[in-house]
Amino acid sequence: MSKVSRGMKISLIFILNPHRIFLASAVWLSYFVYWLADKFDDFAGWLENFANARFKSWPLLGERMSDELNQYYVEKSKEQSRRASEAIIPASQRSNQK
């Protein structure tokens, strides 16, 4: 009887080894995270296709959104550099002000 219970204890320790449980759960979690990322990627692709098809004329969604934003920031930086260059007084005008 003691040999059977000892063998059962050894087999239970082998089956319920915390390292094996941790590794199995880590592998399962990595599969789940990969599956979830794949589903998010599919959803993002679907959303982008839907936005491009539905809101082609509306530049706030779809591919045109980034183009519009890039154009806005380019124009904004040009305006700021133009203002900065206007604020600098040339040397010829500085001597006239004295």
Image: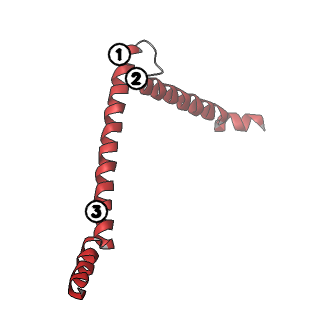
Residue visible at 30% across and 44% down? 35
The image shows residue 13, relative to residue 94, as above or below, that is below
Element under label 1? helix
Q: Position of residue 95 (x, y in %)?
A: 72, 38
Q: Which of marks 1 and 3 precedes in the sequence?
A: 3
Whether the residues at callouts 3 and 1 have beta carbons within 8 Å, the answer is: no
**Between residues 58 and 26, which one lies in front from this camera angle?**
26
The residue where tag 2 is placed is 62
The kind of residue on which mark 3 rests is Ala
In the displayed structure image, the side of residue 8 where residue 54 appears, left or right:
right
Q: Residue furthest right?
A: 98
Q: Nearer the viewer, residue 14 or 40?
A: 14
Q: Earlier in the sequence, mark 1 or mark 2?
A: 1
Residue 98, which numbered label?
Answer: none
Q: At which x and y percent is residue 63?
A: 38, 24
Quarter-of-image position of residue 82: top right
Residue under the image location 33 percent in, 23 percent down: 49
Q: Which residue in the structure is indicated by mark 3?
A: 24
Judged from the image, the secondary structure of the residue bearing numbered disc 3 is helix
Q: Quadrant of the C terminus?
A: top right
C-alpha gap between disc 3 and disc 2 = 41 Å
Q: Residue furthest top?
A: 57
From the image, tell me which residue sits under label 1.
Answer: 53
- Nearest to viewer (mark 3 / mark 1): 3
